[in-house]
Image (tube, rainbow, N blue to C red):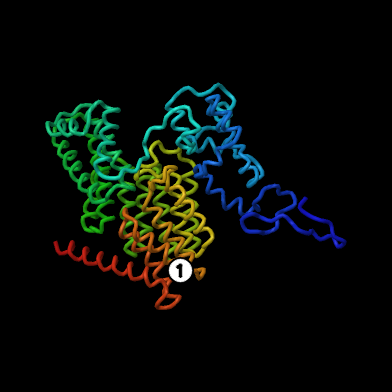
Amino acid sequence: MNRVGAPNGEILNPRRCASCRTALAGDNSAALCGRCQRERQDQFRTPPVLSPEFFDTDEFHAASRNRHMGKIIRAYRYHPRHLAMYGKPLSQETIGRWLGGLTQDAVSKIENGKPQQNLEVLIKQAEILRLPPKLLWFALPGKNLVFADAQSAAESRDKILVASTGMDTSELVRRLRLSSVDDATIDAMHIMVEQMCCEYSHGDAQELAVKGRRWLTKVTELLSQRLTLKQHQEILNNAGMLALLVGCLEYDLGDQRSAESTRRMAMSLGKESNDPMIMGWAHEMLAWFHLTAGNFRAVIPAAETGILAASSQSVTVQLHGQQAKAYARMGMPNEARAALERGSDLLGTLPYPERPENHFVVDPDKWDFYAMDTYRIAGEDDLAKRNAEEVIRRSVTPNGFNISPMRSTEAELTLAVVAARQGDVEQAAALGIEALLHGRQSRPSLLMVASELDNEFATHGSNAGSDFRELFSGIKRATQINTAGENQQ
Protein backbone atom coordinates (compact mmCIF):
# COMPACT_ATOMS: atom_id res chain seq x y z
CA MET A 1 0.00 0.00 0.00
CA ASN A 2 1.22 3.50 -0.71
CA ARG A 3 -0.75 5.24 2.06
CA VAL A 4 -2.07 4.93 5.56
CA GLY A 5 -5.43 6.52 6.30
CA ALA A 6 -5.56 9.61 8.51
CA PRO A 7 -8.57 11.30 10.14
CA ASN A 8 -8.24 14.39 7.97
CA GLY A 9 -7.95 12.33 4.79
CA GLU A 10 -4.24 13.07 4.25
CA ILE A 11 -2.04 10.52 2.48
CA LEU A 12 0.70 9.35 4.79
CA ASN A 13 4.06 7.80 3.76
CA PRO A 14 3.47 8.10 -0.01
CA ARG A 15 5.61 6.11 -2.40
CA ARG A 16 8.31 8.34 -3.87
CA CYS A 17 10.04 8.53 -7.25
CA ALA A 18 13.32 6.59 -7.23
CA SER A 19 14.98 9.46 -9.10
CA CYS A 20 13.63 12.83 -7.90
CA ARG A 21 11.90 11.64 -4.67
CA THR A 22 8.63 13.39 -5.40
CA ALA A 23 5.45 11.62 -4.31
CA LEU A 24 4.07 9.17 -6.88
CA ALA A 25 0.48 9.32 -8.05
CA GLY A 26 -1.78 6.71 -6.54
CA ASP A 27 -2.33 4.99 -9.89
CA ASN A 28 1.40 4.93 -10.75
CA SER A 29 2.78 1.43 -10.09
CA ALA A 30 6.25 2.28 -11.47
CA ALA A 31 9.31 3.38 -9.51
CA LEU A 32 9.56 6.71 -11.41
CA CYS A 33 7.20 9.65 -11.63
CA GLY A 34 5.77 10.61 -15.00
CA ARG A 35 8.24 13.48 -15.47
CA CYS A 36 11.29 11.31 -14.81
CA GLN A 37 9.93 8.58 -17.07
CA ARG A 38 9.61 11.12 -19.89
CA GLU A 39 13.12 12.47 -19.25
CA ARG A 40 14.55 8.96 -19.42
CA GLN A 41 12.92 8.10 -22.71
CA ASP A 42 16.00 9.33 -24.59
CA GLN A 43 17.89 6.42 -23.05
CA PHE A 44 15.66 4.10 -25.08
CA ARG A 45 17.07 5.52 -28.30
CA THR A 46 19.66 2.77 -28.11
CA PRO A 47 19.98 -0.35 -25.92
CA PRO A 48 21.56 0.51 -22.56
CA VAL A 49 24.79 -0.94 -21.25
CA LEU A 50 23.73 -3.46 -18.60
CA SER A 51 25.67 -5.35 -15.98
CA PRO A 52 26.24 -9.12 -16.44
CA GLU A 53 23.83 -9.75 -13.55
CA PHE A 54 20.99 -8.35 -15.65
CA PHE A 55 21.18 -11.40 -17.91
CA ASP A 56 21.44 -13.93 -15.07
CA THR A 57 17.76 -14.95 -14.96
CA ASP A 58 15.94 -18.22 -15.55
CA GLU A 59 14.18 -16.74 -18.58
CA PHE A 60 17.44 -15.77 -20.29
CA HIS A 61 19.07 -19.12 -19.53
CA ALA A 62 16.07 -21.08 -20.83
CA ALA A 63 16.00 -19.06 -24.07
CA SER A 64 19.74 -19.61 -24.51
CA ARG A 65 19.42 -23.37 -24.01
CA ASN A 66 16.69 -23.44 -26.64
CA ARG A 67 18.83 -21.31 -28.98
CA HIS A 68 15.90 -18.98 -29.54
CA MET A 69 16.78 -15.31 -30.04
CA GLY A 70 13.09 -14.39 -29.98
CA LYS A 71 12.74 -15.76 -26.46
CA ILE A 72 15.85 -13.83 -25.41
CA ILE A 73 14.27 -10.65 -26.77
CA ARG A 74 11.09 -11.36 -24.84
CA ALA A 75 13.07 -12.00 -21.63
CA TYR A 76 14.83 -8.69 -22.24
CA ARG A 77 11.54 -6.81 -22.64
CA TYR A 78 9.89 -8.38 -19.58
CA HIS A 79 12.93 -8.13 -17.30
CA PRO A 80 11.98 -7.37 -13.65
CA ARG A 81 14.16 -4.24 -13.77
CA HIS A 82 12.03 -2.72 -16.52
CA LEU A 83 8.82 -3.71 -14.77
CA ALA A 84 9.98 -2.13 -11.52
CA MET A 85 11.23 1.11 -13.07
CA TYR A 86 8.50 1.74 -15.63
CA GLY A 87 5.58 -0.38 -14.46
CA LYS A 88 5.45 -2.22 -17.80
CA PRO A 89 7.75 -4.13 -20.17
CA LEU A 90 9.68 -2.47 -22.95
CA SER A 91 7.49 -2.26 -26.03
CA GLN A 92 8.01 -4.32 -29.16
CA GLU A 93 8.10 -1.02 -31.05
CA THR A 94 11.18 0.04 -29.05
CA ILE A 95 12.96 -3.25 -29.73
CA GLY A 96 11.99 -3.06 -33.40
CA ARG A 97 13.51 0.40 -33.74
CA TRP A 98 16.77 -0.90 -32.24
CA LEU A 99 16.80 -3.88 -34.60
CA GLY A 100 16.83 -1.80 -37.74
CA GLY A 101 13.32 -0.39 -37.98
CA LEU A 102 11.30 -3.60 -37.59
CA THR A 103 7.56 -3.27 -37.07
CA GLN A 104 5.79 -4.38 -33.90
CA ASP A 105 4.31 -7.27 -35.86
CA ALA A 106 7.77 -8.36 -37.06
CA VAL A 107 9.12 -8.40 -33.49
CA SER A 108 6.10 -10.40 -32.36
CA LYS A 109 6.84 -13.01 -35.04
CA ILE A 110 10.49 -13.18 -33.93
CA GLU A 111 9.44 -13.77 -30.32
CA ASN A 112 6.74 -16.33 -31.04
CA GLY A 113 7.94 -17.99 -34.23
CA LYS A 114 10.55 -20.62 -34.96
CA PRO A 115 14.15 -19.94 -33.86
CA GLN A 116 16.18 -17.77 -36.22
CA GLN A 117 18.79 -19.81 -38.11
CA ASN A 118 20.50 -17.07 -40.13
CA LEU A 119 23.85 -16.52 -38.38
CA GLU A 120 24.31 -13.03 -39.81
CA VAL A 121 20.95 -11.91 -38.40
CA LEU A 122 21.70 -13.52 -35.02
CA ILE A 123 25.07 -11.76 -34.78
CA LYS A 124 23.54 -8.39 -35.65
CA GLN A 125 20.77 -8.77 -33.05
CA ALA A 126 23.21 -9.89 -30.35
CA GLU A 127 25.54 -6.96 -31.04
CA ILE A 128 22.74 -4.40 -31.03
CA LEU A 129 21.28 -5.65 -27.74
CA ARG A 130 24.80 -5.96 -26.24
CA LEU A 131 24.16 -9.56 -25.22
CA PRO A 132 27.02 -11.18 -23.24
CA PRO A 133 28.92 -13.92 -25.13
CA LYS A 134 28.20 -16.48 -22.38
CA LEU A 135 24.50 -16.25 -23.29
CA LEU A 136 25.07 -17.08 -26.95
CA TRP A 137 25.43 -20.37 -28.83
CA PHE A 138 27.48 -18.71 -31.60
CA ALA A 139 30.64 -16.59 -31.72
CA LEU A 140 30.65 -12.84 -32.25
CA PRO A 141 33.21 -11.42 -34.69
CA GLY A 142 35.72 -8.93 -33.26
CA LYS A 143 34.37 -5.81 -34.93
CA ASN A 144 34.78 -3.44 -32.00
CA LEU A 145 38.25 -4.37 -30.79
CA VAL A 146 40.61 -1.73 -29.47
CA PHE A 147 44.13 -2.36 -30.70
CA ALA A 148 47.17 -1.86 -28.53
CA ASP A 149 49.32 -0.57 -31.39
CA ALA A 150 49.37 0.16 -35.09
CA GLN A 151 50.73 -3.30 -35.93
CA SER A 152 47.80 -5.14 -34.35
CA ALA A 153 45.37 -2.77 -36.09
CA ALA A 154 47.07 -3.48 -39.43
CA GLU A 155 46.90 -7.22 -38.80
CA SER A 156 43.18 -6.92 -38.11
CA ARG A 157 42.63 -4.97 -41.34
CA ASP A 158 44.46 -7.70 -43.24
CA LYS A 159 42.26 -10.40 -41.70
CA ILE A 160 39.10 -8.50 -42.63
CA LEU A 161 40.36 -7.91 -46.17
CA VAL A 162 41.35 -11.53 -46.70
CA ALA A 163 38.06 -12.80 -45.31
CA SER A 164 36.04 -10.44 -47.51
CA THR A 165 38.02 -10.28 -50.75
CA GLY A 166 40.76 -12.90 -50.66
CA MET A 167 43.56 -10.30 -50.79
CA ASP A 168 45.60 -8.64 -48.05
CA THR A 169 46.87 -5.07 -47.83
CA SER A 170 50.10 -5.72 -49.72
CA GLU A 171 48.17 -7.24 -52.62
CA LEU A 172 45.78 -4.27 -52.66
CA VAL A 173 48.74 -1.87 -52.72
CA ARG A 174 50.34 -3.86 -55.56
CA ARG A 175 47.17 -3.67 -57.62
CA LEU A 176 46.82 0.05 -57.04
CA ARG A 177 50.45 0.63 -57.99
CA LEU A 178 49.88 -1.22 -61.25
CA SER A 179 46.57 0.62 -61.75
CA SER A 180 44.89 -2.78 -61.89
CA VAL A 181 41.34 -1.68 -61.18
CA ASP A 182 38.60 -4.29 -61.10
CA ASP A 183 35.59 -4.92 -58.89
CA ALA A 184 37.62 -6.94 -56.36
CA THR A 185 40.18 -4.12 -56.02
CA ILE A 186 37.49 -1.50 -55.48
CA ASP A 187 35.70 -3.71 -52.92
CA ALA A 188 38.98 -4.16 -51.04
CA MET A 189 39.63 -0.42 -51.19
CA HIS A 190 36.19 0.31 -49.72
CA ILE A 191 36.73 -2.17 -46.87
CA MET A 192 40.13 -0.65 -46.11
CA VAL A 193 38.74 2.89 -46.01
CA GLU A 194 35.78 1.89 -43.85
CA GLN A 195 38.01 0.05 -41.39
CA MET A 196 40.24 3.12 -41.03
CA CYS A 197 37.16 5.24 -40.32
CA CYS A 198 36.23 2.73 -37.61
CA GLU A 199 39.69 3.14 -36.03
CA TYR A 200 39.33 6.92 -35.77
CA SER A 201 37.80 6.98 -32.31
CA HIS A 202 40.56 5.01 -30.57
CA GLY A 203 43.55 4.69 -32.94
CA ASP A 204 46.73 6.74 -32.63
CA ALA A 205 45.86 9.99 -34.41
CA GLN A 206 49.35 10.66 -35.77
CA GLU A 207 49.85 7.16 -37.17
CA LEU A 208 46.35 7.04 -38.64
CA ALA A 209 46.80 10.46 -40.26
CA VAL A 210 50.04 9.38 -41.94
CA LYS A 211 48.40 6.19 -43.19
CA GLY A 212 45.33 8.10 -44.33
CA ARG A 213 47.40 10.57 -46.39
CA ARG A 214 49.26 7.72 -48.09
CA TRP A 215 46.04 5.98 -49.03
CA LEU A 216 44.48 9.26 -50.17
CA THR A 217 47.40 9.77 -52.57
CA LYS A 218 47.09 6.21 -53.92
CA VAL A 219 43.36 6.44 -54.41
CA THR A 220 43.30 9.89 -56.06
CA GLU A 221 46.04 8.82 -58.49
CA LEU A 222 43.62 6.22 -59.86
CA LEU A 223 41.25 8.96 -61.01
CA SER A 224 43.60 9.72 -63.93
CA GLN A 225 43.30 6.13 -65.19
CA ARG A 226 40.79 4.82 -67.72
CA LEU A 227 37.79 3.80 -65.65
CA THR A 228 34.17 2.91 -66.13
CA LEU A 229 31.66 5.45 -64.90
CA LYS A 230 30.81 3.23 -61.92
CA GLN A 231 34.48 2.71 -61.02
CA HIS A 232 35.15 6.46 -61.25
CA GLN A 233 32.20 7.14 -58.93
CA GLU A 234 33.27 4.59 -56.34
CA ILE A 235 36.88 5.80 -56.33
CA LEU A 236 35.69 9.38 -55.89
CA ASN A 237 33.57 8.30 -52.92
CA ASN A 238 36.48 6.47 -51.28
CA ALA A 239 38.77 9.44 -51.84
CA GLY A 240 36.15 11.73 -50.31
CA MET A 241 35.86 9.55 -47.21
CA LEU A 242 39.65 9.44 -46.83
CA ALA A 243 39.83 13.24 -47.11
CA LEU A 244 37.17 13.59 -44.39
CA LEU A 245 39.07 11.20 -42.14
CA VAL A 246 42.44 12.87 -42.66
CA GLY A 247 40.94 16.33 -42.12
CA CYS A 248 39.41 15.27 -38.80
CA LEU A 249 42.70 13.76 -37.65
CA GLU A 250 44.66 16.87 -38.64
CA TYR A 251 42.27 19.02 -36.64
CA ASP A 252 42.52 16.70 -33.62
CA LEU A 253 46.30 17.09 -33.78
CA GLY A 254 46.02 20.88 -33.82
CA ASP A 255 46.98 21.39 -37.48
CA GLN A 256 44.05 23.66 -38.29
CA ARG A 257 45.38 25.02 -41.58
CA SER A 258 45.94 21.55 -43.08
CA ALA A 259 42.58 20.38 -41.72
CA GLU A 260 40.72 23.16 -43.52
CA SER A 261 42.59 22.47 -46.75
CA THR A 262 41.77 18.76 -46.55
CA ARG A 263 38.14 19.55 -45.67
CA ARG A 264 37.88 21.65 -48.84
CA MET A 265 39.32 18.74 -50.80
CA ALA A 266 36.63 16.46 -49.36
CA MET A 267 33.96 18.99 -50.30
CA SER A 268 35.29 19.16 -53.87
CA LEU A 269 35.32 15.36 -54.16
CA GLY A 270 31.79 15.21 -52.73
CA LYS A 271 30.52 17.72 -55.27
CA GLU A 272 32.26 15.92 -58.14
CA SER A 273 30.73 12.60 -57.13
CA ASN A 274 27.41 14.28 -56.22
CA ASP A 275 27.51 12.48 -52.86
CA PRO A 276 25.32 14.33 -50.30
CA MET A 277 26.80 12.36 -47.41
CA ILE A 278 30.36 13.51 -48.12
CA MET A 279 29.20 17.10 -48.67
CA GLY A 280 27.18 16.96 -45.45
CA TRP A 281 30.19 15.80 -43.42
CA ALA A 282 32.39 18.47 -44.99
CA HIS A 283 29.88 21.09 -43.79
CA GLU A 284 29.74 19.36 -40.38
CA MET A 285 33.53 19.65 -40.09
CA LEU A 286 33.30 23.40 -40.81
CA ALA A 287 30.63 23.78 -38.11
CA TRP A 288 32.88 21.85 -35.70
CA PHE A 289 35.87 24.05 -36.57
CA HIS A 290 33.81 27.19 -35.88
CA LEU A 291 32.47 25.77 -32.61
CA THR A 292 35.84 24.89 -31.12
CA ALA A 293 37.32 28.21 -32.30
CA GLY A 294 34.61 30.10 -30.42
CA ASN A 295 32.87 31.39 -33.58
CA PHE A 296 29.48 30.24 -32.30
CA ARG A 297 27.30 32.35 -34.59
CA ALA A 298 29.12 30.98 -37.64
CA VAL A 299 28.16 27.43 -36.61
CA ILE A 300 24.46 28.00 -37.35
CA PRO A 301 24.67 28.84 -41.10
CA ALA A 302 27.47 26.30 -41.68
CA ALA A 303 25.32 23.55 -40.20
CA GLU A 304 22.19 24.80 -41.98
CA THR A 305 23.96 24.60 -45.34
CA GLY A 306 24.97 21.03 -44.54
CA ILE A 307 21.40 20.15 -43.53
CA LEU A 308 20.14 21.39 -46.91
CA ALA A 309 22.87 19.50 -48.77
CA ALA A 310 22.31 16.19 -46.93
CA SER A 311 18.73 16.35 -45.71
CA SER A 312 18.13 12.60 -45.90
CA GLN A 313 21.53 11.53 -44.50
CA SER A 314 22.36 10.61 -40.91
CA VAL A 315 24.97 13.38 -40.77
CA THR A 316 22.01 15.78 -40.53
CA VAL A 317 21.46 14.52 -36.97
CA GLN A 318 24.98 15.62 -36.06
CA LEU A 319 24.52 18.97 -37.80
CA HIS A 320 21.49 19.65 -35.57
CA GLY A 321 23.65 18.64 -32.62
CA GLN A 322 26.33 21.17 -33.56
CA GLN A 323 23.68 23.85 -33.78
CA ALA A 324 22.40 22.90 -30.31
CA LYS A 325 25.92 23.23 -28.89
CA ALA A 326 26.36 26.64 -30.47
CA TYR A 327 22.96 27.95 -29.34
CA ALA A 328 23.69 26.79 -25.79
CA ARG A 329 27.01 28.65 -25.76
CA MET A 330 25.29 31.79 -27.08
CA GLY A 331 22.89 31.74 -24.13
CA MET A 332 19.90 30.67 -26.24
CA PRO A 333 18.51 27.63 -24.37
CA ASN A 334 15.17 27.52 -26.19
CA GLU A 335 16.86 27.38 -29.58
CA ALA A 336 19.31 24.76 -28.24
CA ARG A 337 16.46 22.54 -27.06
CA ALA A 338 14.66 22.97 -30.39
CA ALA A 339 17.79 21.92 -32.29
CA LEU A 340 18.19 18.88 -30.02
CA GLU A 341 14.56 17.99 -30.60
CA ARG A 342 14.96 18.18 -34.38
CA GLY A 343 18.00 15.93 -34.25
CA SER A 344 16.31 13.50 -31.89
CA ASP A 345 13.21 13.25 -34.08
CA LEU A 346 15.32 12.51 -37.16
CA LEU A 347 17.45 9.97 -35.31
CA GLY A 348 14.30 8.10 -34.32
CA THR A 349 13.45 7.52 -37.98
CA LEU A 350 16.85 6.06 -38.94
CA PRO A 351 17.68 2.35 -38.84
CA TYR A 352 20.37 1.15 -36.47
CA PRO A 353 23.69 1.36 -38.39
CA GLU A 354 25.57 -1.79 -39.36
CA ARG A 355 28.92 -0.30 -38.33
CA PRO A 356 28.15 2.16 -35.48
CA GLU A 357 31.88 2.38 -34.72
CA ASN A 358 32.45 4.15 -38.06
CA HIS A 359 33.17 7.81 -37.25
CA PHE A 360 31.06 8.95 -40.21
CA VAL A 361 27.97 7.11 -39.04
CA VAL A 362 25.71 8.77 -36.50
CA ASP A 363 25.00 5.98 -34.07
CA PRO A 364 22.28 6.46 -31.42
CA ASP A 365 24.86 6.43 -28.60
CA LYS A 366 26.26 9.66 -30.00
CA TRP A 367 23.11 11.55 -29.11
CA ASP A 368 23.73 11.20 -25.36
CA PHE A 369 27.05 12.90 -26.05
CA TYR A 370 25.47 15.87 -27.83
CA ALA A 371 22.73 16.21 -25.24
CA MET A 372 25.34 16.05 -22.45
CA ASP A 373 27.26 18.99 -23.87
CA THR A 374 24.14 21.08 -24.37
CA TYR A 375 22.76 20.35 -20.89
CA ARG A 376 26.11 21.22 -19.29
CA ILE A 377 26.30 24.60 -21.01
CA ALA A 378 22.64 25.35 -20.21
CA GLY A 379 23.29 24.64 -16.53
CA GLU A 380 20.95 21.64 -16.38
CA ASP A 381 23.41 19.74 -14.22
CA ASP A 382 21.27 16.72 -13.35
CA LEU A 383 20.61 15.95 -17.01
CA ALA A 384 24.23 16.67 -17.95
CA LYS A 385 25.47 14.29 -15.27
CA ARG A 386 23.05 11.55 -16.25
CA ASN A 387 24.06 11.74 -19.90
CA ALA A 388 27.76 11.91 -19.05
CA GLU A 389 27.52 8.75 -16.96
CA GLU A 390 25.70 7.05 -19.84
CA VAL A 391 28.40 8.13 -22.32
CA ILE A 392 31.11 6.68 -20.08
CA ARG A 393 29.24 3.39 -19.60
CA ARG A 394 28.74 2.96 -23.32
CA SER A 395 32.37 3.78 -24.09
CA VAL A 396 33.69 0.70 -22.30
CA THR A 397 33.28 -2.84 -23.65
CA PRO A 398 32.54 -5.80 -21.33
CA ASN A 399 36.26 -6.62 -21.58
CA GLY A 400 37.20 -3.20 -20.18
CA PHE A 401 38.41 -1.58 -23.44
CA ASN A 402 37.54 2.06 -24.03
CA ILE A 403 36.25 2.22 -27.60
CA SER A 404 35.38 5.95 -27.44
CA PRO A 405 38.12 7.66 -25.42
CA MET A 406 37.37 11.13 -26.81
CA ARG A 407 33.70 10.93 -25.86
CA SER A 408 34.48 9.58 -22.39
CA THR A 409 37.11 12.32 -21.88
CA GLU A 410 34.51 15.04 -22.44
CA ALA A 411 32.08 13.10 -20.25
CA GLU A 412 34.63 13.09 -17.42
CA LEU A 413 35.10 16.83 -17.86
CA THR A 414 31.32 17.25 -17.73
CA LEU A 415 31.18 15.37 -14.42
CA ALA A 416 34.06 17.56 -13.21
CA VAL A 417 32.17 20.75 -14.14
CA VAL A 418 29.07 19.52 -12.31
CA ALA A 419 31.15 18.60 -9.25
CA ALA A 420 32.77 22.05 -9.23
CA ARG A 421 29.38 23.75 -9.44
CA GLN A 422 28.25 21.69 -6.46
CA GLY A 423 31.31 22.75 -4.44
CA ASP A 424 33.24 19.47 -4.58
CA VAL A 425 36.47 21.04 -5.84
CA GLU A 426 38.67 18.07 -4.95
CA GLN A 427 36.55 15.61 -6.92
CA ALA A 428 36.30 18.04 -9.82
CA ALA A 429 40.09 18.41 -9.97
CA ALA A 430 40.64 14.64 -9.87
CA LEU A 431 38.17 14.05 -12.71
CA GLY A 432 39.63 16.91 -14.74
CA ILE A 433 43.20 15.66 -14.42
CA GLU A 434 42.16 12.14 -15.40
CA ALA A 435 40.46 13.53 -18.51
CA LEU A 436 43.49 15.59 -19.56
CA LEU A 437 45.79 12.57 -19.27
CA HIS A 438 43.82 10.42 -21.73
CA GLY A 439 45.92 9.31 -24.70
CA ARG A 440 43.51 9.74 -27.66
CA GLN A 441 42.30 13.34 -27.74
CA SER A 442 40.80 15.92 -30.04
CA ARG A 443 42.91 18.86 -28.92
CA PRO A 444 40.53 21.72 -29.89
CA SER A 445 37.49 20.02 -28.33
CA LEU A 446 39.48 19.12 -25.22
CA LEU A 447 40.66 22.71 -24.73
CA MET A 448 37.14 24.09 -25.25
CA VAL A 449 35.52 21.91 -22.58
CA ALA A 450 38.48 22.02 -20.18
CA SER A 451 38.33 25.83 -20.26
CA GLU A 452 34.79 25.59 -18.85
CA LEU A 453 36.12 23.63 -15.88
CA ASP A 454 38.96 26.15 -15.50
CA ASN A 455 36.37 28.93 -15.30
CA GLU A 456 34.37 27.03 -12.67
CA PHE A 457 37.48 26.67 -10.50
CA ALA A 458 38.07 30.42 -10.78
CA THR A 459 34.78 31.04 -8.98
CA HIS A 460 36.13 29.14 -5.95
CA GLY A 461 39.30 31.21 -5.58
CA SER A 462 42.77 31.40 -7.09
CA ASN A 463 43.99 28.17 -5.46
CA ALA A 464 40.98 26.01 -6.30
CA GLY A 465 41.85 23.07 -8.55
CA SER A 466 45.46 24.25 -8.75
CA ASP A 467 46.83 20.89 -9.95
CA PHE A 468 44.31 20.74 -12.79
CA ARG A 469 44.82 24.38 -13.72
CA GLU A 470 48.60 23.97 -13.85
CA LEU A 471 48.31 20.92 -16.10
CA PHE A 472 45.74 22.66 -18.29
CA SER A 473 47.94 25.76 -18.66
CA GLY A 474 50.83 23.57 -19.81
CA ILE A 475 48.66 21.91 -22.47
CA LYS A 476 47.44 25.31 -23.71
CA ARG A 477 50.99 26.67 -23.95
CA ALA A 478 52.17 23.62 -25.88
CA THR A 479 49.22 23.91 -28.25
CA GLN A 480 49.84 27.60 -28.88
CA ILE A 481 53.53 26.92 -29.63
CA ASN A 482 52.66 24.11 -32.05
CA THR A 483 50.01 26.21 -33.78
CA ALA A 484 52.39 29.15 -34.16
CA GLY A 485 55.03 26.86 -35.68
CA GLU A 486 52.56 25.41 -38.17
CA ASN A 487 51.37 28.86 -39.22
CA GLN A 488 54.95 29.89 -39.99
CA GLN A 489 55.55 26.89 -42.28
The amino acid pointed to by label 1 is Glu
Q: Is residue 263 visible?
A: no
Viewport quadrant of the C terminus: bottom left
Residue 131 lies, in percent from the top left, at 49, 36
Q: Is residue 288 visible?
A: yes
Camera-nearest residue between 361 and 433 = 433
To which residue does mark 1 refer? Answer: 426
Quick one: SS at disc 1?
Answer: helix
Residue 109 point in image, percent of width and height: 57, 26
Which residue lies most toward the bottom here? 462
Q: Position of residue 470 (x, y in %)?
A: 33, 71
Q: Residues within 10 Å of mark 1 (few under 14, many from 20)?
A: some
The image quarter in which residue 24 lies: bottom right
Q: Tell me what residue is drawn at x 66 percent, y 50 percent.
A: 31
* Image: 6 above or below 266: below
Residue projecting furthest to the right: 7
Q: Is residue 205 left or right of residue 114?
A: left
Say above or below: 183 vs 280: above
Residue drawn at point x = 42 percent, y = 64 percent: 430
Residue 201 shown left or right of residue 228 in the figure? right
Locate residue 349, reporting x and y percent: 48, 41
